[in-house]
Amino acid sequence: MTVTADGIEELKGLAGLDLGHTDWMEISQERVNTFADATNDHQWIHVDAQRAANGPFGGTIAHGYLTLSLLIPLFGELLEIRGVGMSVNYGLEKVRFPNPVPVGSKIRLAGKVASVDEVTGEGVQMQLDFTVEIDGADKPACVARAVYRHYA
């Protein structure tokens, strides 16, 4: 279920809120290859299924930065923000990739609003703790704190 916040005042009230989980998203080889083309990162563990089958992960894996970039569309499933003039991605803190994402596996995002603090310019800075989970895996694919700013 997507949480909806309308305006800066409602965003302030989200501090500490567990946003739950998104739906599962399958990570296809096509998505990995497209990311490799976009970033010019064609390392064999990502794009060469035959060689990767004999590699350390038993098959191709998603790029860590691909997993991280999927925070954007997945976050949209957790929180819809209305009634603000502008929102910006302000950065990330404490990003880690504890577990590789095998191609063909499914991931989902869990999120919690760590804090919401006022900033200059009639806005708030929102820090969110994100965990990208892999279906059936004990360890997550990615843990990160994302920082967003929203202005009236």
Image: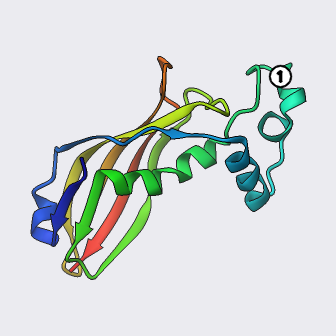
**Within 10 Å of the Cα at label 1, are there few (<14), some (14-19), or many (20+) other Cα atoms?**
few
Coloring scheme of the render? rainbow
Q: Residue at x 81, y 57 (%)?
A: 40
Answer whether residue 142 is visible to the viewer in this image.
Answer: no
In the image, residue 65 sits, relative to residue 126, either above or below, namely above
Which quadrant of the structure image shows residue 150? bottom left
> Residue 19, percent across and down?
24, 44
Label 1: which secondary element:
helix
Position of residue 78 measured from the top left corner of the image (x, y, whole percent) = 30, 50
Residue to which mark 1 is pinned: 53
The x, y position of residue 62, in whole percent, is 67, 39
- Compared with 11, 131 (above or below) is above
Quick check: 1 left or right of 15?
right
Q: Is 42 on the left-hand or right-hand side of 127? A: right
Residue at 16 percent of width and 50 percent of height: 15
Q: Nearer the viewer, residue 111 or 76?
A: 76
Residue at left offset 67%, top offset 34%: 103
Specify whether residue 25 is in view.
yes
